Image (cartoon, grey):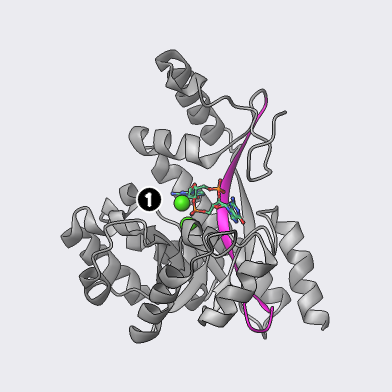
Amino acid sequence: AKEKQDGEPALYDPIMHSSLVERLALEAELRKAVADHQLQVHYQPTYVLESGELVGVEALVRWPHPERGMVQPDLFIPIAEQTGLIHEIGRFVLREACFQGQEWARMSPSTPMNIGVNVSGKQLQRRDFADEVSRALADSGLDAGSLVLEMTESVLMNDAESAMRTLKALKDTGVRIAIDDFGTGYSSLSYLHRFPVDILKIDRSFVDRLSGADAQDSLVQSIVQLGNTLQLETIAEGIEEHSQLIALRRLGCTMAQGYHFGRPAPADTVSALVMDQNAN
Ligand code: C2E
Ligand code: CA
Ligand code: CA
Ligand code: CA
């Protein structure tokens, strides 16, 4: 298997992806994988930058394919969105993450973890999405305050009125909202005032620029300051190097996630971290 840059094996050749036949095959296989419950959820830990304390996870969907190996979400999520499969996949990830989150909460009642779940624009467009979230919380027993729904700026800007309606309904359930890949989208700051947002996730491309020969920290600094002004928490994504961690701390960013701390992994790996933290 050839290694992708991020270290997870990528057996699937993206060039083949451009062929329509190949795409149709992938779509059929995805449909089958969903029906056969083959998708899995991995979890990547999030840490408090100052203390190094484990504060949460982000749930990331995985498709272990019998011949293609691990198919990356960047490849199959777009197909899922185009075919409507995203609703079933999204519901699966949401429910799985809520039940798993509740198990961790039981293991470690004194330190509840934030459970981040990615939400596609297509899911947000559904009128019953907030009900689906309420049901997942009720069925799993997870505290609503532990659930963080991650969505990109473009998802909110695209059909802003209906997005606002759904967001308000979601906020009523007690969950929190994070803007994913912050800084890469429309960058219209006015929506941050209008939408009930709680957390900014600083995109990896900005974190990347914190290290190297032409290191540059003014963009991250602006985002952290914006977060402070609006009383939002800031999570930096994609920390790969210690020097980035040091820079982020200096800039006042509160939380971080990245290969430097830990890669996405099966739930058991995180359970071990939770028990470790409990023992200390
Ligand atoms: P994202 O939401 O921005 O998720 C972060 C991605 O960055 C993940 O890729 C994660 O494995 C990767 N990552 C984390 N730390 C590092 C690092 O230090 N360096 C590098 N190079 N990468 C890092 P992944 O799991 O392949 O997911 C890609 C995208 O697919 C996600 O980007 C998200 O947009 C989408 N996705 C994943 N799971 C779901 C899901 O359940 N539902 C929806 N709608 N989208 C999902
Ligand atoms: Ca995310
Ligand atoms: Ca992101
Ligand atoms: Ca992304």
Q: Position of residue 208 (x, y in %)?
A: 54, 58
The vertical placement of 99 against 176, above or below, is: above
Question: Among all residues in the image, which is located at the extreme front?
Answer: 213
Residue 110 x, y percent position in the rendering: 67, 86
Q: Give percent across and percent down for residue 37.
A: 58, 38
Residue furthest to the top: 21
- Screen quadrant of the C terminus: bottom right
Which span is picked out in magenta? 48-66
Q: Is residue 258 visible?
A: yes
Answer left or right for 218 relative to 212. left
Kindly indicate the quadrant of the structure image that contains residue 72: top right
Return the residue at label 1. 120
Q: Identify the residue at horizontal 67%, vertical 62% (top origin).
A: 241
At 37% across and 39% down in the image, what residue appears?
81
Using the rendered view, name the quadrant where residue 194 is placed. bottom left
Is disc 1 placed on a helix, strand or loop? loop
| Residue 275, placed above or below residue 150 | below
Q: Is residue 61 magenta?
A: yes
Residue type at mark 1 is Ser
Above or below 211: residue 105:
below
* Nearer to the camera, 231 or 221: 221
Looking at the magenta stretch, what is its main secondary structure? strand
Q: Quadrant of the N terminus?
A: top right
Is residue 257 within the magenta segment?
A: no
Q: Nearer the viewer, residue 221 or 70?
A: 221
